[in-house]
Image (cartoon, helix red, strand yellow):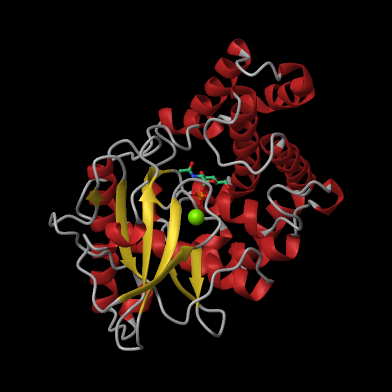
Amino acid sequence: MKNLTETVSHFKTQGVIGEIKPLGTGLINDTYQVTTLGDDTPNYVLQRINHAIFQDVEMLQANISAVTNQIRRKLVEQGETDIERKVLHFVDSESGKTYWFDGENYWRMMVFIPRAKTYETVNPEYSYYAGKAFGDFQAKLADIPETLGETIPDFHNMEFRLQQLRDAVAANAAGRLEDVKYYIDEIEKRADEMCKAERLYREGKLPKRVCHCDTKVNNMMFDEDGKVLCVIDLDTVMPSFIFSDYGDFLRTGANTGDEDDEDLDKVGFDMEIFRAFTKGYLEGATFLTPIEIENLPYAAALFPYMQCVRFLADYINGDTYYKTKYPQHNLVRTKAQFKLLQSVEAHTDEMKSFIDSCLQG
Ligand code: GN1
Ligand code: MG
């Protein structure tokens, strides 16, 4: 890989570049913080786009421009003053595009949002704000003029993800199948129920809307008071079911343990976070249809399930997709997501009555 300072020099940044150091915990792209000297020029974020996963970088960046332009437009209409902290700002490279291809890798840069924080866990108050923010994010994008491409085709298509797992099982490329039979059985038992969204879509009962599709807790920037500034990591913004954003936040935000917790006793579904987030989301996402609302508890289960399927498929394939820190990492992640799923399932009735109470009250 070429020198990072050299890479940065191809972008139209301000100021004198100082330190460049790794940033964040993403499992896909490589991210760096780029500091400029002095206080008068912005700092930046540099990212190497994972080109094996996002194969159409032109489409990827066009989607992101469409989304950030739309959000910026809406913020201006609302008379928002702190716009630079509320929407990502990508920097042009000398090619005139928002990315730079060095002959081997694709890079992009954005302005680092000052005085903002990300969290790996959130309290109920922050979850309420997060719920409103994601509802609001979807609402702002509802009338986006551009048609967004699918940056990863079938990204949150459960039928497709199950097929990938079944293909992995059939190939058994890494010879790991023996250790995981229990999880495959548990996944198959739930397969039909979990593919409900695709069925409802085919029946014309469930719409696709522009969604974020990676609403992990750590993809939100919060200000000093815990209010959400903006949503980051826009690579997967594309048409999907609203379940994606609702479900993936809860998968990460309402988990009492870590996504890859080795101690399964720590993993569980936190109903207090669920209630706060759901309340905020229902307030922000004013466009929801009854069928979308009715299936929010399904969405809460769908994402731990889907992630379990994806981690397990990657484990069986020999860790070709997600970054891993040790050989069993994807299996540990699978087990933690399955435990979370079981905990969500145990709360189904409670979730339903809470949602009913929100609608009545
Ligand atoms: C990946 O890039 P990152 O770490 O925010 C993945 C998500 C998964 C997540 C699991 C493009 O997100 O779909 O939910 O890991 N993104 C892609 O932590 O596959
Ligand atoms: Mg991320």
240 versus 142 height, above or below: above
**Residue 132 horizontal side relative to residue 64, left or right:** right
Residue at 40 percent across and 37 percent down: it is 53
Q: For residue 45, say whether it is visible.
A: yes
Work out which residue is located at the far right of the displayed protein and give it. 265
184 to 219, vertically: above or below: above
Q: How many marks?
A: 0
What residue is drawn where x is 32% and y is 62%? 5
Q: Quadrant of residue 59?
A: top left
Of residue 14 and residue 81, the one placed in the foreground of this image is 14
The C terminus - image quarter:
bottom right
Give residue 62's position: percent from left, percent from top: 23, 50
Q: Quadrant of residue 87?
A: bottom left
The furthest residue to the bottom: 39
Q: Horizontal and vertical percent for residue 139?
A: 37, 62
* Residue drawn where x is 45% and y is 44% of the image: 241
Q: Position of residue 194 (x, y in %)?
A: 61, 32
Look at 61% across and 64% down and name the residue there: 277
User: Where's residue 113, x and y in %?
Assistant: 40, 75
Q: Is residue 285 visible?
A: no
